Amino acid sequence: MSLFNSCDYNISAACACNRGLRRANNEDNFYFDGKLMDSDNNGLEYVLTCTRRVSGHGEDDGCFFAVFDGMGGGQYGEIASYTAAIKTYEFLDEHVPDDYTDVAEMLTDMTLILNDAVFAESSERAVNQMGSTMVGCYFYDGDVWCCNTGDSKCSRLRDGELEQISVDHTDAETMKLNGITGRKPYVTRYLGIDGREMRVVPAIFRDSLKDGDTLLISSDGLTDMVTPEKITEILMGDEDEEEKAQALLVEALKNGGRDNVTILICKVTADQGE
């Protein structure tokens, strides 16, 4: 059982977003404390921060943080990620769980709505493919639910160990079985698929929180550029979350910045007032 099922806790969060050094536009977006970016953007000029107090007794509405990465292989990636972000805002403005048993179903319903919204945008523009990944964390009642489609990642730093808790929806295993090399695995599940062809349900991982847990949510502009060892080293530092997000961004750009980079850090600590 989570420590926070019996007490309140704080989430100290930071969000950095940058176009990178190679791309002409930014196809990433995010949902951060109710904030998101317009579709036409070059990223953030500074790191966003917030602190949220969450009840460990199921007495609040919970909170959600997410990253969306418009698929580089499709068209209008920035529209896809923006559509997913704004629909997340609209959905969470109207829906809250009755208790912890509702969270997974609520996140599944939200994902289906986001998928249909992105697909509708692609149909309106008559493009063959327009998609976005999605990865997010919903904090509620002492637990966290990681929810994702695609290959954007969420990892948990606990007791010095960094572990990926999202699921990569790619053809990596098929590549391995068939000896295919020389390319990055293709994304096989994402927001923007025709619902008549596939019911796009997210991978959901529920975890009980521990004091000191850090959740890292990011687009592949970070994880393709920075090693897990370096990410762990930065997250383990004494700096605050704003400084850590900036340090991870600097590292991704220093290593080439080949893609848009979005980094969202959530540090969980016990409420000292309890």
Image (tube, rainbow, N blue to C red):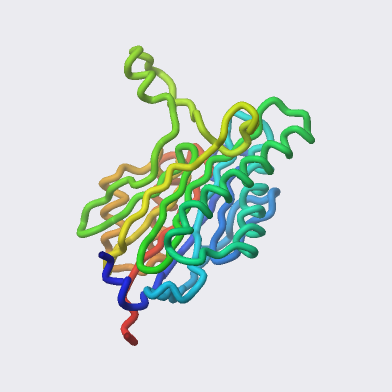
Quadrant of the snapshot with the C terminus:
bottom left
Please give the name of the residue rendered at 35% of the width and 68% of the height, measured from the top-left corner: 142
Q: Is residue 13 positioned above or below 8 on the image?
A: above
Res. 101 image quadrant: bottom left
Q: Is residue 152 positioned above or below 7 on the image?
A: above
Left/right placement of residue 121 relative to residue 26 reads: right
Quadrant of the snapshot with the N terminus:
bottom left
Q: Residue furthest bottom?
A: 273
Q: Is residue 96 positioned above or below 9 on the image?
A: above
Q: Position of residue 16 (x, y in %)?
A: 50, 57
Please give the name of the residue rendered at 48% of the width and 67% of the height, measured from the top-left corner: 62
Q: Position of residue 121 (x, y in %)?
A: 73, 39
Please give the name of the residue rendered at 72% of the width and 34% of the height, measured from the top-left corner: 122
Please give the name of the residue rendered at 69% of the width and 54% of the height, measured from the top-left corner: 38
Q: Position of residue 52 (x, y in %)?
A: 46, 73
Q: Position of residue 188 (x, y in %)?
A: 50, 28
